[in-house]
């Protein structure tokens, strides 16, 4: 029989080989090309030449994998990766994931992993208080990502607005329920509507103003019109830090509107929620404390490996109402003790110890460590704006967060301009940047997602785009 444990010698040999290899990658990420050449045939070939009829030595197999990963991924941990909120993972959080894999605690039931469950509960409470929720009402659950947290929010909102939803689903609802968000909201909201049975047409994507924030005047009109026409508005989803431009909706106004119409108020702060970790940036997302629920990714600005997010709510009973199912086979300790089984609070059932990477990071760096890192990245964003402007670039977005969308006034009506710059730089592997359209104008989008990005990296990015521009 195959020895799934491997022998002690094999294990020792594997660890001896893999640890320096991983350390070398982690330490020298900045020396690699940021992006891989996208040769589909070559990559597919590398994967498929493995023949499962001929098992190989574990050490050689591991070597092949790390070599391929070095070659064939975008190195999101590179300081010149200015991307889609993917962080460089801090080192303790990587160790946390390793520990999690070895101990493999099962979080579905509290009694299987009491320590792990309590760790997550503590984190949800601490972060909930940091957001400004009253301590005695906080509840929440760790999720795989913002997409899961957002559909969790939609399901909680449905269960709150429609008491018959748990048994009869949408058949208990007489007229069509409606969700409101801005046209800049993350499309996981649309997918939440698509997969929850509401359908895409149940989402009203409200127009945005010049700063790409939701137009609250249009929102109010839209809700009033829907009510008049017999629809059932039940949820507003605001965004604190949009994916495209880092815009922050007027969170206080949205709170008033949600309260006025009696709607569930969710704030998607998958990336921007981290602003609460620093006293100077926290006011930027003021109003978040008024939400009924919040999406707060850990695997974005809190710089841990994927996947980790938090859904945090100020309503103690809503997750149970939404997800709890009675079974004969699950442990029943939760009935007698003051504890929660996460399978009654989550879309997931068997669940990994997602929270450990945040717990260990917090143990090692604390609030202050996170505050400093957030401050640094905000400073790098400010520097990027400044150096771009010095070099004749035009900043096109409005946000204090370190996400900058820019173009050149002279080429403003030519989408080929930004596209060719982006393609050149990404193609050469010098940096990762992307394109984002703002009010019909194509812009280059660069977001500081790496705590190791330095002023020299920022200047290198501006030099690179400026050089391509002058070569055009
Ligand atoms: C990234 C993002 C999401 C999706 O989160 P995942 O962690 O990728 O599932 C949702 N909303 C916003 C605003 C995001 O930036």
Image: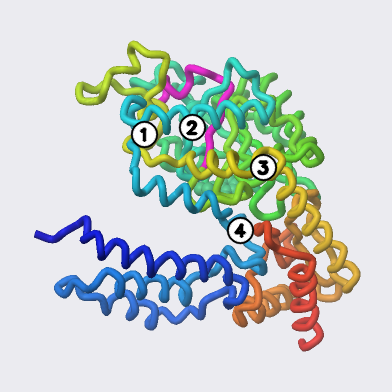
Q: Which residues are magenta?
A: 309-322
Q: CA distance from mark 3 to mark 1?
A: 25 Å
Residue 293 higher or lower than 14, as above or below: above
The reply to whether discs 2 and 1 touch (Cβ–Cβ < 8 Å) is: yes
Q: Residue at x 80, y 60 (%)?
A: 396
Q: Is mark 2 within 8 Å of ligand 1?
A: no
Badge count: 4
Upstream in sequence: badge 4 or badge 2: 4
* CA distance for labels 4 and 1: 29 Å
The residue at which mark 3 appears reads as 274
Badge 4 or badge 1: first in the primary sequence: 4
For marks 3 and 1, the one nearer the N-term is 1
Residue at mark 4? 84
Q: Which residue is mark 1?
A: 107
Q: Position of residue 4 (x, y in %)?
A: 19, 57
Q: Which residue is mark 2?
A: 120
Q: What secondary structure is marked by label 3?
A: helix
Foreground: disc 4 or disc 3: 3
Please tell me whether mark 1 sits on a helix, a strand or a loop: loop
Mark 4 neighbour class, 10 Å CA radius: few under 14, some 14 to 19, many 20 or more: many
Q: Indicate yes or no: mark 4 CB to ligand 1 under 8 Å.
A: yes
């Amino acid at each position: 029989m195959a020895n799934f444990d491997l022998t002690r010698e094999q294990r020792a040999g594997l660890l001896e080989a893999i640890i320096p290899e991983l350390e070398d990658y982690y330490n020298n990420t900045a020396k690699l090309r940021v992006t891989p050449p996208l040769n589909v045939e070559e990559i597919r070939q590398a994967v498929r030449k493995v023949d499962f009829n001929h098992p190989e030595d574990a050490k050689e197999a591991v070597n092949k994998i790390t070599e391929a990963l070095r070659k064939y991924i975008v190195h999101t941990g590179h300081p010149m990766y200015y991307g889609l909120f993917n962080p460089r993972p801090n080192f303790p959080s990587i160790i946390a994931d390793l520990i999690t894999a070895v101990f493999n605690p099962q979080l579905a039931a509290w009694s299987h992993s009491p320590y792990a469950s309590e760790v997550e509960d503590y984190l949800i409470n601490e972060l909930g208080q940091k957001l400004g929720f009253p301590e005695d009402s906080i509840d929440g659950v760790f999720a795989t990502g913002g997409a899961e947290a957002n559909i969790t929010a939609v399901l909680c909102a449905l269960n709150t607005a429609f008491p018959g939803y748990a048994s009869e689903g949408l058949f208990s609802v007489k007229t069509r329920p409606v969700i409101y968000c801005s046209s800049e909201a993350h499309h996981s909201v649309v997918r939440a509507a698509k997969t929850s049975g509401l359908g895409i047409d149940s989402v009203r994507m409200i127009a945005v103003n010049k700063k790409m924030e939701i137009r609250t005047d249009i929102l109010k009109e839209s809700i009033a019109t829907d009510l008049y026409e017999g629809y059932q508005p039940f949820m507003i989803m605001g965004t604190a830090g949009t994916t495209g431009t880092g815009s922050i909706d007027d969170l206080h106004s949205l709170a008033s509107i949600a309260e006025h119409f009696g709607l569930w108020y969710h704030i998607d702060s998958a990336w921007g929620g981290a602003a609460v970790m620093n006293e100077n940036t926290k006011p930027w997302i003021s109003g978040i404390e008024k939400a009924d629920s919040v999406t707060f990714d850990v695997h974005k600005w809190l710089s841990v490996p994927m996947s980790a997010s938090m859904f945090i709510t100020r309503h103690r009973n809503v997750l149970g109402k939404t997800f709890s199912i009675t079974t004969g086979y699950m442990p029943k300790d939760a009935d007698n003790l003051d504890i929660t089984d996460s399978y009654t609070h989550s879309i997931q059932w068997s669940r990994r110890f997602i929270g450990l990477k945040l717990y260990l990071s917090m143990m090692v760096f604390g609030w202050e460590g996170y505050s400093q890192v957030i401050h640094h990245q905000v400073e790098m964003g400010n520097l990027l704006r400044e150096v771009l402007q010095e070099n004749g670039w035009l900043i096109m977005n409005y946000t204090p967060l370190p996400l900058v969308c820019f173009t050149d006034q002279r080429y403003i009506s030519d989408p080929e301009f930004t596209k060719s710059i982006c393609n050149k730089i990404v193609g050469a592997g010098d940096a990762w940047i992307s394109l984002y359209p703002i009010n019909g104008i194509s812009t280059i989008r660069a977001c500081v997602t790496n705590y190791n990005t330095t002023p020299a990296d920022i200047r290198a990015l501006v030099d690179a785009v400026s050089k391509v521009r002058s070569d055009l």
